[in-house]
Amino acid sequence: MNKLRMHSDFPVKTFSNVLDEIFNRSLGDFVGFDNTHTVPAVNIRETDEQYMLEMAAPGFDKSDFNVQLENNQLVISAEKKTEGEKTEGKYARKEFHFEKFSRSFTLPETADFNKIDAQYDKGVLHLHIAKKEEAKLQPAKTIEIK
């Protein structure tokens, strides 16, 4: 069965990075509130005509995204520029920290790499990947017996 396969890119950590993380975390971080590896959720659907990928990535602008096709790998990344941003008041906890991510998906051979459409609307990135004509489900036809 032809399915999209997902991969996530996480930074490689050195031992000193791990120690820094342990000593700089609050108690909440140890009970499941970790925002350092936030990866947007993805829905993938398949129809007879196409594959549809929806990625929840609120807070970004359309211009923050980079969508590339490398061989049969679809790579979606985004980076939010936050330089010069002012914060008034003090946060007891700040979990809305989603500055960049990268996800990759292996496209099946049935995908038409020349027919990929991407749109970003209301915090969701939508990708429509057409199937090759020969991969589309063909209607049944009757064969005449001679």
Image (cartoon, rainbow, N blue to C red):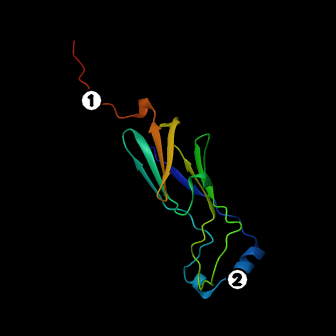
Which of these two is toward me, 43 or 120? 120
Quarter the C terminus occupies:
top left
Report the residue at 60% width, 82% height from top: 29
Q: Is residue 10 above or below residue 5?
A: below
Report the residue at 62% width, 83% height from top: 89
Report the residue at 56% width, 53% height from top: 62
Q: Is residue 67 above or below residue 111?
A: below
Which of these two is toward me, 114 or 119? 119
Give the left or right position of residue 82, taking residue 112 as reference: right
Q: Is residue 46 above or below residue 10?
A: above
Q: Which residue is mark 2?
A: 24
| Dot 2: element | helix
Which amino acid, mark 2?
Asn
Report the residue at 22% width, 17% height from top: 144
Q: Is residue 108 visible?
A: no
Of pointers 1 and 2, the one earlier in the residue sequence:
2
Q: Give how far across and how far down residue 54 sits, in percent.
A: 46, 54
Q: Which residue is mark 1?
A: 140
